[in-house]
Image: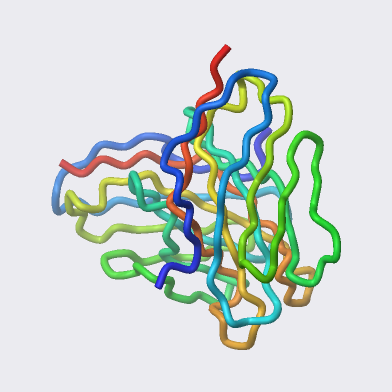
């Protein structure tokens, strides 16, 4: 089974609008971390935001926020006030914290291509 | 200067050739990883190393080998390249700070685009 599912292959948003990129995850481990990365067309992977499974509040980093719904096992990325430079591929990833859980590895989703238009 | 560097950035090679991809980091991190990215598949883990003496296979290690020459250097080798190893390869690092944390953020290099003809 897929550990991370991103159901939106592509999303379009107008500049200055907000957009939500969906991510659902699958784990039975009570301790886990969720990450979002941005990959612009130049190819590098840029860390955006992190949410821990025990965190009581949703993570925020500037224009990025993570809508964490633990019971639904979803960790959607919200980008507010979209900019043209936000056009990129976005990946959701998870790390499990339990014993023997291939310590350190990240499970990645297949990504969502976001296009911001003027 | 970039904290995580990868060389070469682009490489075209022929089937059957041996090729090495190199990764260096100045972040002082102890953990290093190699991933490959294929279109539509996200990133998949090839090998990872928690220190110089600790190397582990990831989910797709067949056809690859690695060497951790120093804390700062982690090389990936394709002993006999084949066309389905054409992909974008990423090196990543994280800092365990001597303990295990789910929040350890992995920082990625710029990637190496490898084409095997």
Q: Looking at this rendering, what residue extends furthest in the front direction?
A: A72
Task: Residue at 69% x, 35% y: name it.
Answer: A79
Tell me residue A24's x, y (percent).
55, 60
Residue at 71% of width from left, 52% of height from top?
A: A67
Q: Residue furthest bottom?
A: A99
* Total count of labels: 0
Q: Is residue A29 left or right of residue A80?
A: left
x and y percentages locating residue B45 in the rendered image: 44, 63
| Residue at 70% in and 77% down | A31
B52 relative to B78, above or below = below
Quadrant occupied by the N terminus of chain A: bottom left
Residue drawn at 68 percent across, 41 percent down? A78
Residue furthest top as drawn: A118
Q: Nearer the viewer, residue A59 or A102?
A: A59
Vertical placement of A53 versus B80: above or below? below
Q: Position of residue A105 (x, y in %)?
A: 55, 68
Residue B6 lies, with reference to residue A16, above or below; the image says below
Quarter of the view holding residue A63: top right
Indicate how the structure is coloured in the image: rainbow
Q: Is residue B29 left or right of residue B66?
A: right
A28 or B67, nearer to the observer = A28
Which one is in front, A113 or B43? Answer: A113
Q: Quadrant of the C terminus of chain A?
A: top right
The front one of A55 and B97 is: A55
Question: From this viewpoint, which residue is outermost toward the right?
Answer: A56
Please give left or right for residue B14 compared with residue A99 in the image: left
- Give coordinates of residue B116: x percent, y percent: 21, 44
């Amino acid at each position: 089974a897929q550990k991370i599912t991103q159901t939106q292959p592509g999303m379009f948003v107008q500049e200055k609008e907000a957009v939500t990129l969906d991510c659902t995850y699958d784990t039975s481990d009570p301790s886990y971390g969720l990450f979002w990365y941005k990959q612009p067309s130049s190819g590098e992977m840029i860390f955006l935001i992190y949410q821990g499974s025990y965190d009581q509040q949703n993570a925020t980093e500037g224009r990025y926020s993570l809508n964490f719904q633990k019971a639904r096992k979803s960790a959607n990325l919200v980008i507010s006030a979209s900019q043209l430079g936000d056009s990129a591929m976005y990946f959701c990833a998870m790390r499990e914290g339990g014993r023997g859980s291939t310590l350190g590895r990240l499970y990645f989703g297949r990504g969502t291509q976001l296009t911001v238009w003027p | 200067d970039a904290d995580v560097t990868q060389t070469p950035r682009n490489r075209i090679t022929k089937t059957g050739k041996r090729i090495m991809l190199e990764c260096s980091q100045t972040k002082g991190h102890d953990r290093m990883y190699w991933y490959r990215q294929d279109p539509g598949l996200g990133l998949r883990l090839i090998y990872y190393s928690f220190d110089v003496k600790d190397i582990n296979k990831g989910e797709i290690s067949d056809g690859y080998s690695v060497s951790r020459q120093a804390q700062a250097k982690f090389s990936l080798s394709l002993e006999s390249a084949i066309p389905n190893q054409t992909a974008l390869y990423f090196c990543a690092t994280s800092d365990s700070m001597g303990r295990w944390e789910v929040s350890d953020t992995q920082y990625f290099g710029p990637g190496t685009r490898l084409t095997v003809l």
